[in-house]
Image (tube, grey):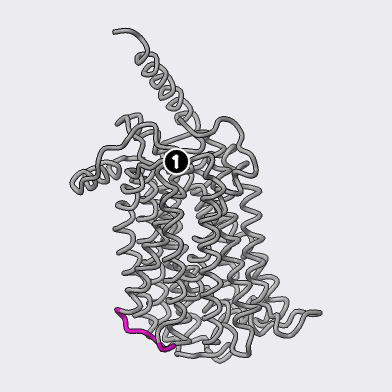
Amino acid sequence: MAFTQGPLPIRLRLTQGLGAMAFGVKDNGFSFFLLIFYNQVLGMDAGLVGLALMLALVFDAVLDPLIGYFSDRTYTRWGRRLPWLYIAPWPLAIMWILLWSPPGGEAPSFLGLLGIAVGVRVLLSACEVPQVSLLPEITADYDERTTLFRYRYLMGWGGGILMMVLAYTVFMRGPDGILEPEGYVGFGIAGAAIMALSVVGSALGLHKLVAHPPAKRPPPFRWRDAFAEIKEAFSEKAFLIFAAGAMAAYVSQGTTFSISNYLNVFVWQLDQVEIPGLPIRLTGLTAYPLVLFLSAVLMFIVVSPLHRRFGKAYTAAGGALAAFVLAFIPYMLFLLGAWPQVGTLGSTMLFYLFLVFANASGIVSMISASSMVAEIIELFEERTGERAEGKFYAGNWLVQKCATGAGIFISGQIIALAQMPAKAKAGEVGMDVLSPMILLYAGVSLILAVIAAYWLARFPITRESHEARLALLDDAARADAEGEVLPP
């Protein structure tokens, strides 16, 4: 039985979403800054950095189902999830600082980077998996679940964008911009503080609602049972269809995020654009976080109406295709010579116009796919009689992290194949490098968008089937309750 019935209060939506700021900070750091920091600032080979980050993600993703299993099996007077949310954020903050301040201020070895990245990923999962597993426990309503995901995505994007603003305007505002080595120390400390405070703050806000023992004590932990239950959860057909589409979408997102700073600086030269009326240090690149935030707000407004009109599956598929088309129109016009002079205010404003709608479409696709997982939980409960929020959301993170790691790896290989020189400067990289980088990126993104749209559109759970399933489960629960009080 869900913790709440009916419409959720705004305070609860905000509190549940607050914890996603930690994921936003991590995602922003890994996706936008980590590759360029270790490659262009510390001098590590881009291909090796991409490989280390991919392996870290794969290692973490393998552990995620176990974290979900442990979370489902946790039995305390504060419930299943809260102990994780009170403990895990603090070592996570320490590891995050270490990631951006490697010992000696120099590039670590390949294994050193791999170890730090694995530590960050695993500890972030120990926060995120229990947090998201609370969502279907809070409400069983088809639309309210979408609402909670809207708030989580908005707060997650808010956390990531806040770090981007701080990076561009506070920590890396010197003449070298995002290539400023000293700025990454403060960037890491600020991110660590936001991570820890957002997760613990969310847990405190939810404490009164969820801090009670589970209705049914879970059986004791056994390694053999853990892997058997994980295998059973992953055999659910609806989850496999979701995973096929989400995998392609997440690979595309990982590729886009990790290569974006290269494109923003070397193709669009956003850091060379002066904004009239603002200090010279506030360049066109400084506006990039604002554009991303506007796209997140646009998503927040349109996603629920789209779900009501088309359902989650078709909204996710359409969003994936729209994101590709809108994102690559500027690049194709640039290659054809039909784009305004890059590095100018006109070029920047037109690029940002396309970016707002492209990024909003991509987030709509992601939030729709993530919301699908909640409905799989009741499908699994109908078939087995057991709830498995932790395992399914851990499975979602397994898919996401493997795919994001693959996306970062692909970006590293694209940059290496295009022969991007180390410590390059905007305006000094020729079309012999930029053209293959754009074409490789476009080809990969097109393939991934088509695969994502095909599988997400085939997701079998609709609003009607979900509501019918909830009615059957409620009837069964009432019958069990009545059976308990009836005499033998």
* Residue 394 rendering spot, x and y as whole percentages: 36, 51
Amino acid type, residue under disc 1 in the picture = Ala
Q: Which quadrant of the structure image shows residue 121?
A: bottom left
Q: For mark 1, give the secondary structure.
A: helix
213 w.r.t. 244: above or below: above
* Residue 120 rendering spot, x and y as whole percentages: 40, 67
Closer to the camera, 382 or 69?
Answer: 69
Query: Which residue of the protein is positioned furthest toward the top in this rendering?
Result: 487
* Residue 249 rendering spot, x and y as whole percentages: 44, 57
Indicate left or right for 445 with 307 as reference. Answer: left
Q: Which quadrant of the structure image shows residue 206?
A: top right
Going 30% across and 57% down the picture, which residue do you hit? Answer: 63
* Residue 390 rendering spot, x and y as whole percentages: 37, 46
Closer to the camera, 174 or 340?
Answer: 174
Going 33% across and 62% down the picture, which residue do you hit? Answer: 60
Highlighted magenta segment, given as a residue range:
104-111
Q: Does the magenta-highlighted stretch encompass residue 246?
A: no
Closer to the camera, 71 or 91?
Answer: 91
Q: Which quadrant of the structure image shows residue 213?
A: top left
331 w.r.t. 204: above or below: below
User: Can residue 445 be spotted in the picture?
Assistant: no
